[in-house]
Amino acid sequence: MIGIFVAMGGPDGYGYRYISTQDGDAVPFNWIDISSTGTPLGAGDDWCSGSSAGRYYPLGFPFPYYADTVDSISVCSNGTVLLQGISNYLGLSNYPLPYSGPGFVAVMWDDLDPPEYGGDVYFQSFASCPDGYGGACAVVQYHNVPRFGNTTLMDFEVILYDNGNIKLQYNSAVYYNDATIGIQDIGATTSNRYYLEYVYNGSPSSHVPDSGTAVMFLYPVPVDYDVAAVSVSPTGVIPVAPITFTATVENLGLVPTTSTDVILNVYDTTTSTLVFSDTQTVAIPETSSANVSFSPFTPSPSRFYKLQVIASDPSDTVNYNDITYAYARTFYLFGDIVEEWQFPRLGDSTGYSFAGMTYVPDSGKFYVVTLNPRGVYRFDPHDPYGTLLPASFTLHNFFGSNDYVWGIAYGNGTFYISHFGYDGSSITGSKIGYYDGDGNLVDSLDVWASIESGGYMAGMDWDPASSLLWGVYAGGSNSVYKVDVTLKDAAGTFPNASGGALSDISVFYPLSEVYYGGFRVSRIFQMSYAGSLLRQDTLTQVAGMDVWAECTSPDDPVYLFVALNDMRNTLLKIGTGHTCADVVNVSEKRERDPGVGVEVIGRTITVEGQATVYDASGRKVATFDGTYEVGHPGVYFVKVKERTFKVVIR
């Protein structure tokens, strides 16, 4: 019945594995239609035959399921079949496995509504399975079943074979959206791992079923010798320092091993070369696992590694599970959370205080608007816990007692803070206040009169390359505006990839990138300066953000600080996917390069033609012709025509 396969999922803690047509495995798709021959169950909305009607359906054969033997089942309208605890009710809301409840098969666990368009669920048992299997089987078919509130009618089924195998088949286009597919034992936990999840809420996306999909869960059959490579850690981000990888291997057989070689191979994916290998030998008791630690490995900066673990035993003839893979890297991807701080006692301790945020290179501090209390705080990014304190701002009440503040940006010695009026039911106006370095109002811009009315300007950032204030408009068009603060008018727009209301924006010209996000869209976006979407990641309750680049080495990461408008006033430092080496193509120049025309001697930068100097944070320091004397040591970026270079001033 089962042919040669390419890949296999699992095992879980009991030994179940799955194979799937979506993974390239030879799983036969043999649809068994029982909609005219089987027993119609009369499945109602949010219904289980056992708990709702006291009806249980005999399989006609003993069915091994985990450590139990099952002879009857309960069928639920929301895409689940209960094999243990069958008098229970399994709800309409799907969850990831393991779920605290009965032992069940999630064929497509979601809020389904069989009777909405005349569909039903059917059951039939066969002494000889009609799909070509030589033994008995039982089929539960969901026929013309839609998701609640949707019109797509779906056909899918589960086949229970007398050898303990379970096959799921999908015979129509599937309006998936989100659902759980998998199996679990009663009392399954993350510790015993007596569950095997195929897909949950679209992850992995390659396992979202469609017409012709077949998934087979294989009942574990004990053998004398079967050694499996299960996992290796740590994975994800690792430090640039000696690190000890540890692998977990399992002896699934009934005989202990005495000399199992466990091999670790580390490949640099950039160069596709093997950079490290180590072998350890262990003995593993029967039906047990062992952790194996390898010799230390020292990774290099900005590298992506593929980790291969091989469990090799001369007696093991079951080879499909001998190898496992994982990945580790010495850099942060966009969206990686690097550090987290929380300030639950800010304001009246109810949370939801943080709004827009900006980095001020002149002071090396972040400034963040707070709603509770209404004001501006600042902190040192090296120590947010120890330095978050009120900044000296006298915020103007443009809209009297109904004046609220959200966004903040800094450029050329001026703070720009967005104000809006809210009378308890609607927005009454939007203005941008111009504040000097001491926090005093010096000018303002009426957003409704000059740019757009109806909503309000939320987060903002200053772009030194264009000398424009970029702001995200919440409500109305939900546009990203470029604002000329001198003319007090819009100077253009920038694409809003979210399609919704954003909360804040960060423009980082040295990387030619723009970042924005919002608590309404629950995502953050990485855009090119030209307006193309590069990456996005899920992040809820985003209120404020700005880039922080402290470039003392080309290997230093470029971070994005993000303030969340949540109950604990959370502040995050996340990765942008960049290091300082990405910003420039010259690390330090002390001699004339005729092809480039940039020279650094002491604190003097000499160029051929006109150039612009930015500091490490991206703030424009000066535009000059010929030579420029830098006032302070540090890392600077010099833009000459279309090229940008990093120079180090000692």
Image (cartoon, rainbow, N blue to C red):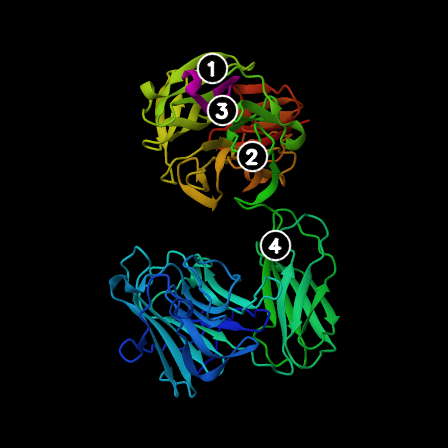
Spatial CA distance of label 4 from label 1 is 50 Å
Residue 351 at x, y percent in the picture: 54, 33
Q: Which residue is mark 2?
A: 569
Residue density around tag 4, few if under 14, some if 14–19, many if 20 or more, within 10 Å: many
Residue furthest toward the top?
442
Q: Which residue is mark 1?
A: 396
Q: Earlier in the sequence, mark 1 or mark 2?
A: 1
Residue drawn at x 30%, y 55% as measured from the top left: 149
Q: Quadrant of the C terminus?
A: top right
Q: Earlier in the sequence, mark 3 or mark 2?
A: 3
Q: Which residue is mark 3?
A: 409
Question: Marks 1 and 3: which is nearer the front?
Answer: 1
Residue toward you, 375 or 495: 375
Mark 2 secondary-structure assignment: loop
Residue 146 at x, y percent in the picture: 31, 61
Q: Earlier in the sequence, mark 4 or mark 3?
A: 4
| Amino acid under disc 1 | His
Residue furthest toward the front?
54
Residue density around tag 3, few if under 14, some if 14–19, many if 20 or more, within 10 Å: many
Q: Which residue is mark 4?
A: 328
Residue toward you, 122 or 96: 122
Mark carried by residue 587: none
Residues rendered magenta in the picture: 398-416
Spatial CA distance of label 1 from label 2 is 24 Å
Q: Earlier in the sequence, mark 4 or mark 1?
A: 4
Question: Marks 4 and 1: which is nearer the front?
Answer: 1
Mark 3 secondary-structure assignment: strand
| Amino acid under disc 4 | Ala
Residue toward you, 239 or 214: 214
Question: Marks 3 and 2: which is nearer the front?
Answer: 2
Residue drawn at x 74%, y 71% as measured from the top left: 281
